[in-house]
Amino acid sequence: MSIGLSERAGAIAGSATMAVSARAAELRAAGNRVVSFGAGEPDFPTPGHIVEAAQRACADPVNHRYTSSAGLAELRRAVAESVLADTGLAIDKTDVLVTNGAKQAVYLACMVLLNPGDEALVPSPYWTTYPEAVRLTGATPVPVRSDPARDYKVTPEALDAHLTPRTKVLLFGSPANPTGTVYTPEEIRAIGDWAAQRGIWVISDEIYQHLLYDGAVAASMPVAAPGVRDQCIVIGGVSKTYAMTGWRVGWLYGPAGAVKAAVNLQSHMSSNVSNVAQAAAMAALRAGRPGFEDVLASYDRRRHLMVDILQGIRGVDCPTPTGAFYCFPSVKRLLTRSILGHSFASTAELATFVLDRVSVALLPGEAFGAPGCLRLSYALDDQSLQTGLERLQRLLSSQDLPRAHVH
Ligand SMILES: Cc1ncc(COP(=O)(O)O)c(C=O)c1O
């Protein structure tokens, strides 16, 4: 008799970013001022009117009880209205499911679409959760590589080259994590049309839809490619736009049958999302985005600072991202030489070295299916950003630094 864990548990990789996070925590505990470029979350507090709505919801006994698994009716309506306002797509509120963050929406979408043995195309570099969510269903993630010279974009031709009779789903995101790539509406239309013609479902992760720079436009998949609408589940949420990562509210919407299946699944997994958090999300959507231009202007300033400094480091090639809040430079040329007598077989090793030497946390490209790259979030305050980038620049330019505490 075996007392082992399930095959499913064994198939899930621990987060490759955890090693860096754990080491960063150790260094902090030892008194180092660690600058972390790791976190994919806004450094701004959740706006006051949202917090106040949550406080009011806390005091209302109606929110002390279970509510509908699909989400509060008013929030589902607010999501449908914001989708219409933002994208022009008219959806029924009953085709919206409120989830515990967009992450759970990705997982639920995979669960209702994929069977064991199916394949899901995942453009790479990918958000580290996508292949794991696919694997949890017993299906196989199939990476479709893109390269920095083409802004990390995949094309219908590249997708076609990976198509097999088992391909069921394309997991697509624009603006993308980790690259910050934003596909044009025409490119999204081409990909959506391709999926419609081939009979492939699209899970379109649009959580970064409002984080755009340089005039980039975030087209929504079912709007750019109406032909794919009946086989497209869209993912969204409040985490990134409204600085609400800790509140855990996301959603999915799509064809009624798929959404109903996802509601059924959620009803047994987690019942409803916290009512207080849903009330907060409702306040966020209802109030629009007051002050958001200032937030975007801050990200934009930080984006320029980061790209300029990274581009100035010999051996670093950093495309200019036009969405989200990440840079994803290639350091392949850097890996071919040694720094302070050290050489590196992977960006994981390089990230550990950088953390140990100058207390700067970076995420290794391996976690995103892109060895030779690093992910840096610029969603941190200007002072930390400047300090961290200067430390990085000095180290990677190989000037000797004291190994002891960096303040
Ligand atoms: C592409 C992408 N989708 C979804 C999420 C999940 O967001 P949430 O905090 O709503 O679960 C993230 C968070 O990093 C993300 O980068």
Image (tube, rainbow, N blue to C red):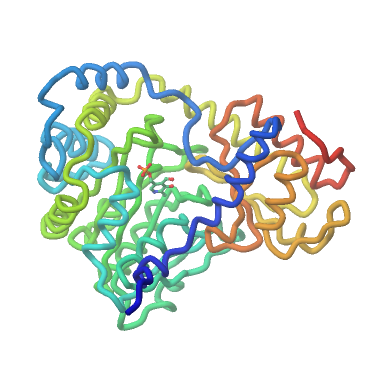
The residue furthest bottom is 165
Q: Is residue 224 left or right of residue 179?
A: left
Is 87 placed above or below 205 here? Answer: above
| Residue at position x 28%, y 43% in the image | 100
200 on left or right of 390: left
The quadrant in which residue 285 appears is top left
Foreground of the two, 54 or 96: 54
Q: Residue at x 46, y 42 (%)?
A: 216
Q: Looking at the figure, which quarter contains the N terminus?
A: bottom left
Residue at screen point 37% across, 78% down: 163
x and y percentages locating residue 44 in the rendered image:
47, 25
Q: Is residue 63 left or right of residue 324?
A: left
- Residue at image x 43%, y 73%? 157
Query: Is residue 6 toward the left or the right of residue 295 in the image?
Result: left
**Looking at this view, is 364 or 315 the one in front?**
364
28 over 12 or under it: above or below: above
Towards the viewer: 287 or 106: 106
* Quadrant containing the C terminus in the rendered view: top right
Closer to the camera in the image, 85 or 404:
404
Q: Position of residue 263 (x, y in %)?
A: 15, 52
Residue 252 picture location, percent across and down? 24, 48
Q: How many tags in the picture?
A: 0
